[in-house]
Image: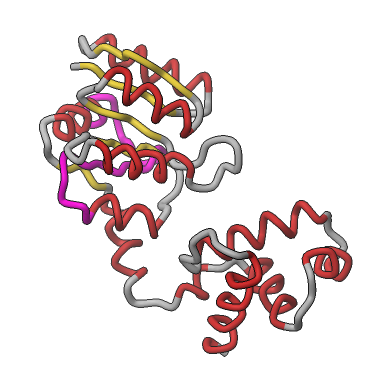
């Protein structure tokens, strides 16, 4: 079996590669960001991609978005997501696509090497390996308003956005950096499922969602 690994942690990336090698599984490329992942997938056509969710440059959902783009080109590409987080919106899209093998495991819940290797082989053969916690979170997602997924700080930022404040004004009000506010706003857009478009349009839609929830 030939695999590609996308993981920004050098130690974890090397550890997975060594573990797979001990099982006779060849790692044909190991990369640390989504753009490079797309390149090596196109170059090597592996039997499986093992991908983290949060990678450079923004550490939000680059890994998942990259594999979804890759599966647009190669629909049957088996993908095993190995992450600390459940990125709900794109996870649903990946798992419900119905194409190729799909796995989504939480790093801290992988109990032993044999369990992980079994998941690798199963997904590569076109099967599934979904952590029960991932399933629970995705099921709960369908029962709650996206606003509920915001952190207290993100709700605070969104509330100030609803008052018509700019990012700079919000930063001054909360005594944080402009960069911190930009990160919170980006997270808000992602959690509310607002695709990149005109900035003002997304702000208006986010505020409307906030006001409808109150």
132 and 142: which is toward the camera:
142
Report the residue at 61% width, 78% height from top.
Answer: 204
Can you say which quadrant of the picture contains the N terminus?
top left
How many marks the image carries: the answer is: 0
Relative to 36, say whether 203 is above or below: below
Relative to 133, say whether 168 is above or below: below
Report the residue at 86% width, 70% height from top.
Answer: 173
Could you tell me residue 190's position as x and y percent? 52, 60
Per the image, is 151 magenta?
A: no
Looking at the rendering, the stretch of residues picked out in magenta corresponds to: 96-116
The quarter of the displayed image where residue 75 is located = top left
Report the residue at 27% width, 43% height from top.
Answer: 72
The quarter of the displayed image where residue 52 is located = top left
Q: Is residue 125 left or right of residue 51?
A: left
Check the image and name the residue furthest to the front.
Answer: 198
Q: Is residue 176 left or right of residue 109?
A: right
Chosen colour scheme: secondary structure
Could you tell me residue 199's position as x and y percent? 64, 65
Report the residue at 38% width, 34% height from top.
Answer: 51
Relative to 172, say whether 23 is above or below: above
Could you tell me residue 15's position as x and y percent? 41, 17
Q: Is residue 179 left or right of residue 12?
A: right
86 and 75: which is toward the camera:
75
Per the image, is 97 magenta?
A: yes
138 and 45: which is toward the camera:
45
Could you tell me residue 130's position as x and y percent? 24, 47
Can you say which quadrant of the picture contains the C terminus?
bottom right
Relative to 172, say whether 183 is above or below: above
122 and 43: which is toward the camera:
43
């Amino acid at each position: 079996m030939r695999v590609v690994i996308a993981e920004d942690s050098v130690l974890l990336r090397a550890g997975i590669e060594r573990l797979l090698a001990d099982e006779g599984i060849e790692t044909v490329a190991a990369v640390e960001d989504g753009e490079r992942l797309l390149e090596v997938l196109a170059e090597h056509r592996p039997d499986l991609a093992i991908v983290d969710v949060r990678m450079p440059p923004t550490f939000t959902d680059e890994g998942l978005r990259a594999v979804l783009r890759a599966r647009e080109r190669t629909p049957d590409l088996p993908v095993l997501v190995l992450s600390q987080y459940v990125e709900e919106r794109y996870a649903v899209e990946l798992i419900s696509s119905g194409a190729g093998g799909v796995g989504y495991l939480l790093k801290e819940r992988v109990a032993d090497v044999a369990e992980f290797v079994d998941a690798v082989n199963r997904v590569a053969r076109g099967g599934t390996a979904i952590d029960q916690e991932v399933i629970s979170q995705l099921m709960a997602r369908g029962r709650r308003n996206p606003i509920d997924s915001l952190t207290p700080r993100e709700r605070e930022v969104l509330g100030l956005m609803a008052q018509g404040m700019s990012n700079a004004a919000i930063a001054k009000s909360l005594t944080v950096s402009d960069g911190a506010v930009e990160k919170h706003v980006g997270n808000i857009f992602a959690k509310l499922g607002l695709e990149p478009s005109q900035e003002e349009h997304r702000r208006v839609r986010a505020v409307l969602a906030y006001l409808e929830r109150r």
